[in-house]
Amino acid sequence: MWDIKGKTFLITGGASGLGAQYAKTFLQLGAKKVAILDVAESVGVSFVTSLNETYPGKAVFIKCDVGNEDDIKGAFQKALNDLQRLDVIINNAGIMSDSPDLWRKSCEVNWQGLVSFTMKGVESMRIDEGGAGGTIINIASTAALFKLPTMPVYCGSKLAVIHFSQSLAEPPFFERTGVRILTMCPGPTDTPLLHNLLDRAIDKKYAEEFYAAVPTYTQEVESAVNAVVKMYQEGDCGSIWLSVKNKPAQDITDMFRNFYIELAKVI
Ligand SMILES: NC(=O)C1=CN([C@@H]2O[C@H](COP(=O)(O)OP(=O)(O)OC[C@H]3O[C@@H](n4cnc5c(N)ncnc54)[C@H](O)[C@@H]3O)[C@@H](O)[C@H]2O)C=CC1
Ligand SMILES: CCCCCC(=O)/C=C/[C@H]1[C@H](O)CC(=O)[C@@H]1CCCCCCC(=O)O
Protein backbone atom coordinates (compact mmCIF):
# COMPACT_ATOMS: atom_id res chain seq x y z
CA MET A 1 0.00 0.00 0.00
CA TRP A 2 1.51 3.33 -1.07
CA ASP A 3 1.35 6.17 1.48
CA ILE A 4 -0.50 9.42 0.88
CA LYS A 5 0.40 10.97 4.24
CA GLY A 6 3.26 13.47 3.98
CA LYS A 7 3.42 13.37 0.17
CA THR A 8 3.48 16.41 -2.11
CA PHE A 9 1.28 16.54 -5.20
CA LEU A 10 1.39 18.55 -8.44
CA ILE A 11 -1.97 18.42 -10.25
CA THR A 12 -2.39 19.86 -13.74
CA GLY A 13 -5.84 21.16 -14.64
CA GLY A 14 -6.51 21.13 -10.90
CA ALA A 15 -8.57 24.33 -10.61
CA SER A 16 -11.89 22.65 -11.34
CA GLY A 17 -13.53 19.40 -12.45
CA LEU A 18 -11.87 16.11 -11.55
CA GLY A 19 -8.46 17.71 -10.87
CA ALA A 20 -9.90 19.88 -8.08
CA GLN A 21 -11.54 16.84 -6.48
CA TYR A 22 -8.24 14.89 -6.61
CA ALA A 23 -6.63 17.80 -4.73
CA LYS A 24 -9.35 17.94 -2.05
CA THR A 25 -9.36 14.20 -1.56
CA PHE A 26 -5.59 13.73 -1.31
CA LEU A 27 -5.43 16.60 1.22
CA GLN A 28 -8.25 14.97 3.23
CA LEU A 29 -6.21 11.77 3.19
CA GLY A 30 -3.10 13.46 4.60
CA ALA A 31 -1.12 14.89 1.66
CA LYS A 32 1.52 17.36 2.82
CA LYS A 33 1.00 19.97 0.07
CA VAL A 34 -0.62 20.33 -3.34
CA ALA A 35 0.39 22.57 -6.24
CA ILE A 36 -2.57 23.34 -8.49
CA LEU A 37 -1.48 24.17 -12.04
CA ASP A 38 -4.13 25.53 -14.37
CA VAL A 39 -4.65 28.01 -17.17
CA ALA A 40 -7.80 29.35 -15.44
CA GLU A 41 -6.21 31.82 -13.02
CA SER A 42 -9.15 33.32 -11.15
CA VAL A 43 -10.86 29.93 -10.68
CA GLY A 44 -7.55 28.45 -9.51
CA VAL A 45 -6.76 31.27 -7.07
CA SER A 46 -10.20 31.10 -5.45
CA PHE A 47 -10.07 27.29 -5.26
CA VAL A 48 -6.65 27.39 -3.56
CA THR A 49 -7.92 30.08 -1.16
CA SER A 50 -10.78 27.77 -0.16
CA LEU A 51 -8.40 24.80 0.25
CA ASN A 52 -6.11 26.87 2.49
CA GLU A 53 -9.08 27.79 4.72
CA THR A 54 -9.43 24.09 5.56
CA TYR A 55 -5.76 23.09 5.20
CA PRO A 56 -3.74 26.21 6.09
CA GLY A 57 -0.62 26.69 3.96
CA LYS A 58 -1.01 23.41 2.11
CA ALA A 59 -2.13 24.58 -1.34
CA VAL A 60 -0.49 26.81 -3.93
CA PHE A 61 -1.76 27.95 -7.31
CA ILE A 62 0.60 28.25 -10.27
CA LYS A 63 -0.72 29.57 -13.56
CA CYS A 64 0.26 27.25 -16.40
CA ASP A 65 -0.97 26.45 -19.88
CA VAL A 66 0.15 22.84 -20.21
CA GLY A 67 0.05 23.21 -23.98
CA ASN A 68 2.91 25.73 -23.81
CA GLU A 69 6.45 24.49 -23.13
CA ASP A 70 7.73 27.81 -21.74
CA ASP A 71 4.84 27.89 -19.27
CA ILE A 72 5.56 24.28 -18.28
CA LYS A 73 9.25 24.96 -17.61
CA GLY A 74 8.51 27.95 -15.36
CA ALA A 75 5.59 26.30 -13.55
CA PHE A 76 7.45 23.05 -12.92
CA GLN A 77 10.40 24.90 -11.39
CA LYS A 78 8.08 27.03 -9.26
CA ALA A 79 6.27 23.91 -8.02
CA LEU A 80 9.61 22.32 -7.09
CA ASN A 81 10.62 25.51 -5.22
CA ASP A 82 7.27 25.78 -3.41
CA LEU A 83 6.93 22.10 -2.49
CA GLN A 84 10.68 21.46 -2.08
CA ARG A 85 10.20 17.94 -3.40
CA LEU A 86 7.65 16.43 -5.79
CA ASP A 87 6.35 13.01 -4.77
CA VAL A 88 3.31 12.70 -7.05
CA ILE A 89 2.34 14.30 -10.35
CA ILE A 90 -1.21 13.92 -11.65
CA ASN A 91 -1.26 14.74 -15.36
CA ASN A 92 -4.96 15.55 -15.43
CA ALA A 93 -5.36 18.65 -17.64
CA GLY A 94 -7.29 17.75 -20.76
CA ILE A 95 -9.45 19.29 -23.44
CA MET A 96 -12.09 17.46 -25.40
CA SER A 97 -12.50 19.32 -28.66
CA ASP A 98 -11.96 18.05 -32.17
CA SER A 99 -13.38 21.25 -33.74
CA PRO A 100 -11.28 22.77 -36.57
CA ASP A 101 -10.00 25.64 -34.39
CA LEU A 102 -9.16 23.57 -31.30
CA TRP A 103 -7.97 20.10 -32.31
CA ARG A 104 -4.31 21.10 -32.44
CA LYS A 105 -4.48 22.76 -29.02
CA SER A 106 -6.10 19.63 -27.60
CA CYS A 107 -3.18 17.51 -28.91
CA GLU A 108 -0.75 19.92 -27.23
CA VAL A 109 -2.61 19.79 -23.91
CA ASN A 110 -3.72 16.13 -23.75
CA TRP A 111 -0.57 14.66 -25.16
CA GLN A 112 2.51 16.88 -25.45
CA GLY A 113 1.92 18.62 -22.12
CA LEU A 114 1.53 15.28 -20.39
CA VAL A 115 4.73 13.96 -21.96
CA SER A 116 6.63 17.06 -20.88
CA PHE A 117 5.46 16.85 -17.25
CA THR A 118 6.18 13.13 -17.17
CA MET A 119 9.74 13.63 -18.42
CA LYS A 120 10.42 16.49 -16.02
CA GLY A 121 8.90 14.47 -13.19
CA VAL A 122 11.04 11.42 -13.90
CA GLU A 123 14.15 13.59 -14.04
CA SER A 124 13.47 15.17 -10.64
CA MET A 125 12.28 11.98 -8.90
CA ARG A 126 14.66 9.30 -10.18
CA ILE A 127 16.67 7.60 -7.42
CA ASP A 128 19.53 6.77 -9.80
CA GLU A 129 20.19 10.51 -10.12
CA GLY A 130 19.77 11.57 -6.51
CA GLY A 131 15.96 11.82 -6.33
CA ALA A 132 13.62 10.18 -3.83
CA GLY A 133 11.41 8.24 -6.26
CA GLY A 134 7.75 9.00 -6.77
CA THR A 135 4.57 8.40 -8.72
CA ILE A 136 3.30 9.83 -12.00
CA ILE A 137 -0.41 9.39 -12.68
CA ASN A 138 -1.45 9.88 -16.29
CA ILE A 139 -5.15 10.43 -16.98
CA ALA A 140 -6.33 8.79 -20.20
CA SER A 141 -9.99 7.91 -20.89
CA THR A 142 -12.28 5.13 -22.02
CA ALA A 143 -12.30 7.18 -25.23
CA ALA A 144 -8.99 5.36 -25.84
CA LEU A 145 -10.79 2.03 -25.52
CA PHE A 146 -13.74 2.50 -27.86
CA LYS A 147 -13.97 4.14 -31.25
CA LEU A 148 -15.81 7.43 -30.90
CA PRO A 149 -16.25 8.69 -34.48
CA THR A 150 -17.30 12.14 -33.30
CA MET A 151 -13.97 12.66 -31.54
CA PRO A 152 -11.13 10.82 -33.26
CA VAL A 153 -8.52 13.38 -32.18
CA TYR A 154 -9.50 13.10 -28.52
CA CYS A 155 -9.57 9.26 -28.78
CA GLY A 156 -6.13 9.26 -30.43
CA SER A 157 -4.60 11.60 -27.83
CA LYS A 158 -5.88 9.40 -25.00
CA LEU A 159 -4.62 6.17 -26.59
CA ALA A 160 -1.27 7.93 -27.00
CA VAL A 161 -1.32 8.60 -23.24
CA ILE A 162 -1.78 4.89 -22.51
CA HIS A 163 0.86 3.67 -24.93
CA PHE A 164 3.41 6.31 -23.89
CA SER A 165 2.89 5.40 -20.23
CA GLN A 166 3.04 1.63 -20.64
CA SER A 167 6.04 1.81 -22.98
CA LEU A 168 7.99 4.11 -20.65
CA ALA A 169 7.15 1.91 -17.65
CA GLU A 170 8.53 -1.30 -19.15
CA PRO A 171 10.88 -3.12 -16.71
CA PRO A 172 13.44 -2.34 -15.46
CA PHE A 173 12.22 1.29 -15.45
CA PHE A 174 10.90 1.18 -11.86
CA GLU A 175 13.86 -0.80 -10.49
CA ARG A 176 16.23 1.75 -12.05
CA THR A 177 14.40 4.99 -11.28
CA GLY A 178 12.06 4.32 -8.35
CA VAL A 179 9.38 6.16 -10.32
CA ARG A 180 6.00 4.51 -10.70
CA ILE A 181 3.97 5.31 -13.83
CA LEU A 182 0.21 4.65 -13.51
CA THR A 183 -2.57 5.23 -16.05
CA MET A 184 -6.27 5.74 -15.34
CA CYS A 185 -9.07 5.47 -17.91
CA PRO A 186 -12.17 7.14 -16.49
CA GLY A 187 -15.44 6.60 -18.34
CA PRO A 188 -17.85 9.51 -18.94
CA THR A 189 -18.01 11.39 -15.63
CA ASP A 190 -20.27 14.25 -14.62
CA THR A 191 -18.11 17.35 -15.23
CA PRO A 192 -18.23 20.37 -17.61
CA LEU A 193 -16.03 18.40 -20.05
CA LEU A 194 -19.18 16.65 -21.23
CA HIS A 195 -21.18 19.85 -21.81
CA ASN A 196 -21.92 20.94 -25.40
CA LEU A 197 -20.83 17.65 -26.97
CA LEU A 198 -21.96 18.82 -30.43
CA ASP A 199 -19.64 21.86 -30.44
CA ARG A 200 -16.70 19.60 -29.55
CA ALA A 201 -17.22 17.15 -32.42
CA ILE A 202 -15.15 16.87 -35.57
CA ASP A 203 -18.37 17.09 -37.60
CA LYS A 204 -21.33 18.70 -35.86
CA LYS A 205 -24.01 17.42 -38.27
CA TYR A 206 -22.87 13.82 -38.04
CA ALA A 207 -22.52 14.16 -34.25
CA GLU A 208 -26.22 15.08 -33.95
CA GLU A 209 -27.17 11.77 -35.58
CA PHE A 210 -24.58 9.84 -33.60
CA TYR A 211 -25.54 11.12 -30.15
CA ALA A 212 -29.24 10.67 -30.95
CA ALA A 213 -28.54 6.97 -31.51
CA VAL A 214 -26.24 6.11 -28.57
CA PRO A 215 -27.40 6.16 -24.96
CA THR A 216 -25.51 8.63 -22.79
CA TYR A 217 -24.55 7.78 -19.25
CA THR A 218 -22.18 9.33 -16.74
CA GLN A 219 -20.70 8.35 -13.41
CA GLU A 220 -20.30 10.48 -10.29
CA VAL A 221 -17.10 12.48 -9.82
CA GLU A 222 -16.61 10.76 -6.44
CA SER A 223 -16.37 7.40 -8.14
CA ALA A 224 -13.66 8.56 -10.57
CA VAL A 225 -11.73 10.14 -7.69
CA ASN A 226 -11.94 7.05 -5.47
CA ALA A 227 -10.62 5.04 -8.40
CA VAL A 228 -7.51 7.21 -8.65
CA VAL A 229 -6.93 6.90 -4.89
CA LYS A 230 -7.19 3.10 -5.09
CA MET A 231 -4.85 2.99 -8.10
CA TYR A 232 -2.35 5.24 -6.27
CA GLN A 233 -2.42 3.00 -3.20
CA GLU A 234 -2.29 -0.36 -4.99
CA GLY A 235 -1.06 0.02 -8.57
CA ASP A 236 2.14 -1.48 -9.92
CA CYS A 237 4.38 0.53 -12.21
CA GLY A 238 2.99 0.32 -15.76
CA SER A 239 -0.51 -0.66 -14.66
CA ILE A 240 -3.60 0.61 -16.47
CA TRP A 241 -6.89 1.08 -14.64
CA LEU A 242 -10.54 1.60 -15.51
CA SER A 243 -13.22 3.61 -13.67
CA VAL A 244 -16.71 3.28 -15.17
CA LYS A 245 -20.37 3.43 -14.20
CA ASN A 246 -19.69 4.06 -10.49
CA LYS A 247 -18.02 0.67 -10.14
CA PRO A 248 -14.83 0.16 -8.09
CA ALA A 249 -11.60 0.73 -10.03
CA GLN A 250 -10.49 -2.25 -12.09
CA ASP A 251 -6.89 -3.08 -13.01
CA ILE A 252 -7.03 -3.88 -16.76
CA THR A 253 -3.27 -4.23 -17.31
CA ASP A 254 -3.54 -7.91 -18.23
CA MET A 255 -5.97 -7.14 -21.05
CA PHE A 256 -3.35 -4.89 -22.63
CA ARG A 257 -0.61 -7.42 -21.92
CA ASN A 258 -2.59 -10.16 -23.70
CA PHE A 259 -3.33 -7.85 -26.62
CA TYR A 260 0.39 -7.26 -27.16
CA ILE A 261 1.19 -10.96 -26.72
CA GLU A 262 -1.30 -11.73 -29.53
CA LEU A 263 0.08 -8.97 -31.73
CA ALA A 264 3.67 -10.12 -31.15
CA LYS A 265 2.74 -13.41 -32.84
CA VAL A 266 2.12 -11.62 -36.15
CA ILE A 267 4.67 -8.83 -36.15
N1 LIG B 1 -15.22 14.05 -17.43
C1 LIG B 1 -15.09 12.95 -18.12
O1 LIG B 1 -16.07 12.34 -18.56
C2 LIG B 1 -13.75 12.38 -18.36
C3 LIG B 1 -12.59 13.10 -18.22
N2 LIG B 1 -11.39 12.53 -18.53
C4 LIG B 1 -10.16 13.28 -18.43
O2 LIG B 1 -10.00 13.78 -17.12
C5 LIG B 1 -9.30 15.01 -17.16
C6 LIG B 1 -10.08 16.07 -16.40
O3 LIG B 1 -11.34 16.20 -17.02
P1 LIG B 1 -12.54 17.02 -16.38
O4 LIG B 1 -12.25 17.39 -14.99
O5 LIG B 1 -13.75 16.27 -16.69
O6 LIG B 1 -12.50 18.31 -17.30
P2 LIG B 1 -12.98 19.80 -17.00
O7 LIG B 1 -13.15 20.44 -18.33
O8 LIG B 1 -14.11 19.82 -16.04
O9 LIG B 1 -11.70 20.45 -16.24
C7 LIG B 1 -10.49 20.58 -16.90
C8 LIG B 1 -9.54 21.49 -16.14
O10 LIG B 1 -8.35 21.58 -16.93
C9 LIG B 1 -8.02 22.94 -17.10
N3 LIG B 1 -7.34 23.15 -18.35
C10 LIG B 1 -7.86 23.15 -19.60
N4 LIG B 1 -6.91 23.46 -20.50
C11 LIG B 1 -5.77 23.65 -19.81
C12 LIG B 1 -4.45 24.01 -20.17
N5 LIG B 1 -4.13 24.27 -21.44
N6 LIG B 1 -3.52 24.10 -19.20
C13 LIG B 1 -3.84 23.89 -17.89
N7 LIG B 1 -5.07 23.56 -17.50
C14 LIG B 1 -6.02 23.45 -18.43
C15 LIG B 1 -9.35 23.68 -17.05
O11 LIG B 1 -9.19 25.06 -16.75
C16 LIG B 1 -10.08 22.90 -15.97
O12 LIG B 1 -9.75 23.40 -14.68
C17 LIG B 1 -9.08 15.32 -18.65
O13 LIG B 1 -7.81 14.90 -19.04
C18 LIG B 1 -10.14 14.51 -19.33
O14 LIG B 1 -9.80 14.18 -20.66
C19 LIG B 1 -11.29 11.23 -18.94
C20 LIG B 1 -12.39 10.48 -19.07
C21 LIG B 1 -13.72 10.96 -18.76
C1 LIG C 1 -18.68 -0.52 -27.43
C2 LIG C 1 -18.95 0.75 -28.20
C3 LIG C 1 -19.06 1.86 -27.27
C4 LIG C 1 -19.29 3.11 -28.05
C5 LIG C 1 -19.45 4.19 -27.08
C6 LIG C 1 -19.65 5.45 -27.80
O1 LIG C 1 -19.24 5.58 -28.89
C7 LIG C 1 -20.36 6.49 -27.16
C8 LIG C 1 -20.17 6.75 -25.91
C9 LIG C 1 -21.08 7.64 -25.21
C10 LIG C 1 -21.73 6.85 -24.14
O2 LIG C 1 -22.97 6.41 -24.61
C11 LIG C 1 -21.89 7.75 -22.97
C12 LIG C 1 -21.20 8.98 -23.33
O3 LIG C 1 -21.29 9.99 -22.71
C13 LIG C 1 -20.35 8.74 -24.52
C14 LIG C 1 -20.21 9.97 -25.37
C15 LIG C 1 -19.37 11.00 -24.68
C16 LIG C 1 -17.98 10.87 -25.05
C17 LIG C 1 -17.11 11.72 -24.23
C18 LIG C 1 -16.18 10.87 -23.44
C19 LIG C 1 -15.24 11.70 -22.68
C20 LIG C 1 -14.31 10.82 -22.02
O4 LIG C 1 -14.75 9.75 -21.61
O5 LIG C 1 -13.11 11.14 -21.93
Image (tube, rainbow, N blue to C red):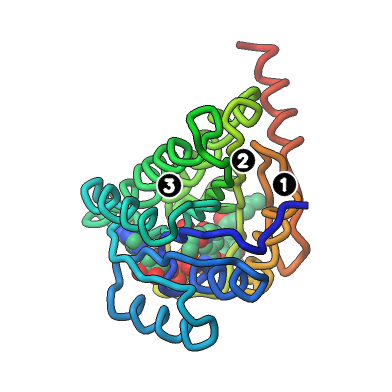
Distance of mark 1 from mark 3, alpha carbons? Answer: 29 Å
Which of pointers 1 and 3 lies earlier in the amino acid sequence? 3
Q: Label 3 sits on what residue type?
A: Pro
Q: Would you call the spot at circle 3 few (<14 residues within 10 Å), some (14-19), or many (20 or more)?
A: some
Q: Is mark 3 on a helix, strand or loop?
A: helix
The label nearer to you, 1 versus 2, is 2
| Marks 1,3: beta carbons within 8 A | no
242 or 89: which is nearer to us?
89
Q: Would you call the spot at circle 1 few (<14 residues within 10 Å), some (14-19), or many (20 or more)?
A: many
> Is residue 157 placed above or below 62 in the rendered structure?
above
236 or 223: which is nearer to us?
236
Identify the residue under disc 3: 152
Q: Residue at x 57, y 31 (%)?
A: 177
Residue 173 image offset from top left, x and y in percent: 60, 27
Q: Is mark 2 on a helix, strand or loop?
A: strand
Distance of mark 1 from mark 2, alpha carbons? Answer: 9 Å
Distance of mark 2 from mark 3, alpha carbons? Answer: 29 Å
51 or 265: which is nearer to us?
51
Identify the residue under disc 2: 180
Quadrant for residue 252, please give it. Answer: top right
